[in-house]
Amino acid sequence: MSGALTVSAGAVAVDPDVLDAAAGVLAGAAADVVACGADLAGVALDPALLLSVPLAPATGVPAGRALGELLLGRGAAAPLAARVLLLAGLLRTASLRYRVGEEAVAAVVQVARRAAAEVVVGAAPALAAGAAGALAADVALRTAQAQDAVLVRALAQVAATGEVDLEALAVIAAEEHGAVDDRVRADVQRVGLLLARHPWLVQEAVATTPAVLGAASGRVPALGVGLTVLAPQVLQPHAGATELAGVFTALGAFGPLFRETAVRVVPAASRAVPTRPPRGIAEVLDGVAHQSTGFAPHGPAGSVGDRMPPAGTPEPGTVRLERVTGADGRRAWIVEVPGTQDWTPLPSAGGTPMDLTTNLRAVAGEPTATAAAVAEAMRRAGVGAGEPVMLAGHSQGGLTVAALAADEAFRARYLVTHVITAGSPVDGIEVPEEVRVLSLEHTGDVVPALDGRAAQASGSRTVVRRDVGEDPDFAADVAKDPLTSHGWRTYLDTAALVDASTDEALVAYRSSAAAFLDAPGARVDVFDYRAERS
């Protein structure tokens, strides 16, 4: 286990002049990258080069291939320059925040996004044509690669035998040309991998989409009317991820898509019962993991710290409460909520509420069936009004527990003192200062970026970031499947680093959570419940 943690726990003093200077350097670098891209495009379209390819395919095709990768590949000039400019924009935004305050900066950012949205909408036909042209160029490149493979094989045959075996070449040609579709499809999928590897793209796309919709509605009156009826909030000047999610949840008023339902909570058979209270953050999150239908046992004993025996997959919709009773008889509760278990947009009776509908409603700031299920499970388990409660969740589970901690009525009923989230888009949820929040986020995890906001620490919220792709234990898995950054194995590993950290903010959080952790004479009881839509 290795890897560096970046811990944020409140404001940091920065010289805005330094930020401005750094942003200027980055903007200049982006301009240089764009200029290089233009030069490359000019070389690639040089008639002399294009005419030379049929005459000298053995050298011309590889040269074209290399140019194509520079123009269209993952390191192409345009997306690289965009990433650099976005970083420059973030620095300029931070400088503005120091100079004029948060409210003024929010207004400036909205104006900037609106301007960008107008450009996007106005250029939509050209962008579509450009995308088609890029795909056509990619197909041409892949076809040239196939032809080159055949030519190389033919040259090898001549060198070996002095003649060409046309039948053998026909087989190779069929294989190579048949692979063109797969290669092009892989290139398209690479866009998806790019988003997974660079979550900031998702974050910015989510944040800017309401502005794009607003710009488009000004040009297409029918769209404007539809949005006004369906979700007028998305057309407001400061619309963001919350309002965008509201567009989808509003569909529930017109049909079965994302329609909220009542929820039924019933006792569930306890499985993998812990032998003691958790000793740290990793063991708390391991308890959450054991409620997840996608969880694979961590370690030979099936749990972090050998706290629980191996167990099979739980039923969908399972929530666990751990009641920790100290040697003095005082009780504290840990509520463990897993993430999304059903991605269908059509909620159904008997289905788990931990679905796409809950995701969208939670981001939109609306009540959810999952939150209702957690509250009902706490009532059934007998959580007392003055007994401390720690809410812990992964992905949607973290979104749910943060929403509950922000709910004034819920806090009036239960004494929520601590929240732990892992891989959750909770930056738009305002949890009150009296609740201590610990958020774990991986820089390669797309999910925390879905709220369209950058994580902000505060006096009561500690944000821990880690790039698991730089950890030798995970680098190969992350490179193969970027979703590894959102998985349980990586988040439990990060939580173990949090437990071992001597960072002042993390030590303070662990100390404040002593009532929930193992101590001499403490014992634990579990209460498992299953939630289903009704």
Image (cartoon, rainbow, N blue to C red):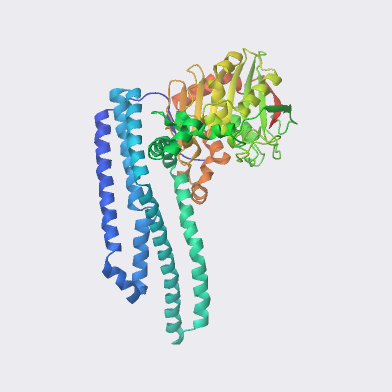
Residue 156 at x, y percent in the picture: 44, 79
- Does 59 appear above or below 341? below
Most extreme residue toward the bottom, as rendered? 162
| Residue 132 image offset from top left, x and y in percent | 41, 56
Location of residue 493 (image quadrant) = top right
Q: Quadrant of residue 285?
A: top right
Q: Nearer the viewer, residue 121 or 372?
A: 121
Q: Could you tell whether 444 is left or right of 258 in the image?
A: left
Residue at image x 60%, y 21%? 516
Q: Quadrant of the C terminus?
A: top right
Q: In this figure, what is the number of numbered marks?
A: 0
Q: Residue at x 50, y 27 (%)?
A: 438
Question: Residue 490: image x %, image y %?
Answer: 54, 40
* Residue 390 visible somewhere in the drawing: yes
Q: Is residue 283 above or below residue 122?
A: above
Q: Is residue 303 left or right of residue 68?
A: right
Residue 282 appearing in the image? no
What residue is rendered at 41% in x and 65% in y?
A: 140
Q: Position of 87 compared to 327: left or right?
A: left
- Camera-side residue: 213 or 439? 213
Instruction: Tell me the quarter of the picture where residue 459 sits.
Output: top left
